[in-house]
Amino acid sequence: MGKEKVSIKKNQKKSISYKFGIALLIIAVLCWLIAAVTTLMPFSFTVKASIITGSLIIGEILFWIGALLVGKEVVSKYKCYLNPKNWWKKGERQKHEE
């Protein structure tokens, strides 16, 4: 029961900049998805190239701004999850979850 109170307090202490950083990271992923989906759309080649280039650049900018706002620990934790080398290793995940 004591751990529940601690985790609730941690969730309540998240600052606005942290929440804004998480939102920017989510928007960055959506920008990357727009680039992927655009290849399937019936646009001309120049329009597709413009949309893909713009969305990738905006996605990268938003990702790095969001990463700066959420902090090094959060980024390294999720970076470990996204690395295919660590998908089958349990020890690495447990180290980052603590």
Image (spheres, helix red, strand yellow):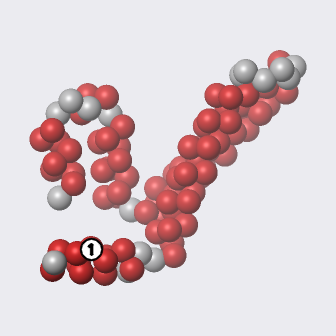
Q: Kindly state the secondary structure of the residue where label 1 is placed.
A: helix
Q: Quadrant of residue 20?
A: bottom right
- Please state the horizontal and vertical placement of residue 26, each as a whole percent of the image: 55, 51
14 is higher (above) or lower (below) than 77: below
At horizontal 17% and vertical 74% (from top left) the residue drawn is 3
The residue lying furthest to the left in this view is 91
Front one among 31 and 2? 2
- Residue at screen point 61% across, 51% down: 27
Q: Residue at x 41, y 75 (%)?
A: 14
47 left or right, relative to 28: right
Residue 97 horizontal/vertical position (percent) = 21, 54
Is residue 37 shown above or below 18? above
- Check disc 1: other Cα within 10 Å, few if <14, some if 14-19, many if 20+: few
x and y, in percent, of residue 64 in the image: 52, 51
Can you identify the residue that label 1 sits on? 7
Quarter the C terminus occupies: bottom left
Residue 75 in the image: above or below residue 43: below
Q: How many marks?
A: 1
